[in-house]
Amino acid sequence: MDRLDAVSSLKYFVPELVLVLTLMGVLVCDLISKNRATWERRLVIVLPSLFGLLVALFFSVFIYFSQKGPDPSDAQALFSNMVAFDGFGSLLRILFIFTAIIILLFTIESRELRSVHHGELLVLLLTVTVALIWMANSINLLMIYLALETVSVASYIMVGYLKTDRLSNEASLKYILFGAVSTGTMLFGLSLLYGLTGSLDLYEIRAALTSEQVVASSGPALMVIIVLVLAGIGFKMATVPSHFWCPDVYSGAPTPVTAFLSVGPKVAGFAVLVRFFYGGMALSTGEQTWTMVGSVDWQTILMGISIITMTLGNIAALLQTNLKRLFAYSSIAHAGYIMMGAVALSDRGIKAMLAYVIVYLFMNLGAFLVIIVVHNSTGSFDIKDYAGIWRRSPILTIVMGIFLFSLMGIPPFAGFLAKWYVFAAVIRAGLVWLAVIGVLNSAIGAFYYVKILKTMFMEGSDTAEPSSKLELHPLYAVLLFVLVVPNIIGLLLWGYLDRVTEYSHKLLDVM
Amino acid sequence: MIPLEYYLVVASALFSLGLYGMLTRKNAVNVLMAIELIFNSANINLVAFSRFVTGDTEGQVFALLVIAIAACEAAVALAIVMSLYRITKGVSLEDASVLKG
């Protein structure tokens, strides 16, 4: 494994560079189109952003396949050991850029964003995308902190983008206060870790934690550090106890932004979790399992967080009447499921997390797209206003049903595959009862997902004449198709998903 | 010379004060000040460790970047507080209580 300096690292950094250039270009396009008509202006900013994202996607897919080639051992540490360049990162890079493209298309016809000019929103979206990639690849405490803060600060503004809307502002304020405290707490933990091990590099930290003299003296300190750091990472993943912001922010933010927050930063949070714990606090045994280094049993801590997170998320979701809040709690519950993969302490666990994340992207973004489409027609996020949707648009109801069954984890759909992966991983790790808790939680989850579906089939009591069709913009129809197909043919993709994760679970390792 | 422990005690005290202020204050600007305390407690730690434990400049560079990031964050936070003030005519966190459940 090589350690590259800044200049020779740049050739491995092409997608990120493309994104940075795009976001600067979009900013300029936005400025020069100031006096144009609204639709012209929209075109002038949307097309370059879309083009830049597609070019970046092309390069990251190219990197992924060239890396995967005959000699896959070319993991590198870029920028003097700041950023990793490995299979794990190159898969997540594709996921983040794909998510950004989908969200960009979400924003175009959304009713909430129709009245505001959304040039800056796209710039922020591109900023967050770049920072998410950095976050998922950072192997240095400084880089982890910088990337996490870049994601946070830009997403605070995205949440508060509707300047005249009270809820959007309120959500943004809550998000920034909560986020600043969480990341501040994490920063304090990182500074203690720096003092304890004398290094900011995760692999040097691991080497220091392996030495006996540190192990003997560091028990309580390491415990405090792990708890503090989990406060910050947990804020991004929306796991207990840093989940309080989630329902308020999700329901106050513009829906495309909510959809983005529920996928992008959450996935990046899990990537940081894997990098931090598997890079800095565990050693691979070479036989597909990992052992913890240091004196703290962090596996048990993660297990506790996972159980509480999914149970709390599912039970609180039962009580919700607002669909965006319901999906906030549902995404908290899914964070608990994904974390089960990290608890397994095995290669299989990391593979399961990646598989879950890929499937989660399609089913969750799909469900949010249905929410956007319904809101475009009815102007409401209340579940009770979903009554009679079946009459008004049977296709939309069927599509939503597929997303919901996928989120539940019902067999023919992709969600089942995702759950199967994580449950199998924890059972292989000998934690059968954790898998049982997971299955029980999926059963609780089925209640509120079915409740939504039931409401959609119910007769609408409102004044809207039942014959009126729900308008479905052609763009959204195409997007729904793109998102729903992987959910339907999920089981056929089993072998493919297996191969993708088999390659991508390999983390850069500095021995 | 002042030993390392003194720095750590000051940093921990600042961190605790920051958390306390964040939990008890009702005014959004006061909460932001408490958050600054948390960031600066970490800075003291970083600089002290870089001086006493490692002897290199990594920790000091980290502290400088933290100062920059904290400034960005404060700027965004104040902008959001201003924006909310235009709607609710107040900066108390009790004004931000429509979203709940």
Image (tube, grey):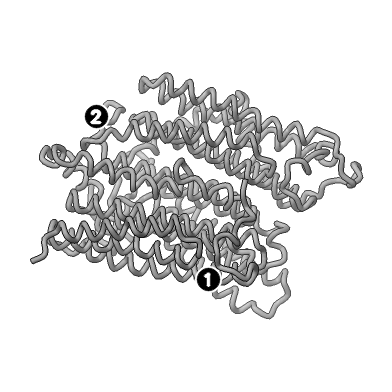
| Residue furthest to the left | B1
Q: Is residue A33 above or below residue B16?
A: below
Image-based side of A80 in relation to A330, left or right: left
Judged by depth in the image, the label closer to the viewer, 1 or 2, is 1
- The chain ID associated with circle 2 is A
- The front one of A179 and A112 is A179
Q: In the rendering, at what x and y percent does residue B84 appear?
A: 60, 67
Q: In the rendering, at what x and y percent does residue A55 appear?
A: 51, 58
Determine which residue is flagged by label 1: B79
Image point (63%, 51%), residue name: A251
Q: Is residue A22 above or below residue A452?
A: below
Q: Is residue A462 above or below residue A19?
A: above
Q: Amino acid at mark 2?
A: Thr
The reply to whether residue B60 is visible in this rendering is: yes
Image point (67%, 63%), residue name: A165
Q: Are marks 1 and 2 in contact (CB under 8 Å)?
A: no
- Residue A285 is marked as 2
Image point (45%, 56%), residue name: A179
- The front one of A15 and A416 is A416
**Other-residue count near label 2 (Cα within 10 Å), few / some / many at <14 / 14–19 / ≥20:** few
Q: In the rendering, at what x and y percent does residue A422 appear?
A: 46, 28
Q: In the rendering, at what x and y percent does residue A104 appear?
A: 61, 57
Measured Cα–Cα span from mark 1 to mark 2: 50 Å
Q: Amino acid at mark 1?
A: Ala
Quadrant of the rendered structure where residue B67 is?
Answer: bottom left
- Residue A466 is marked as none
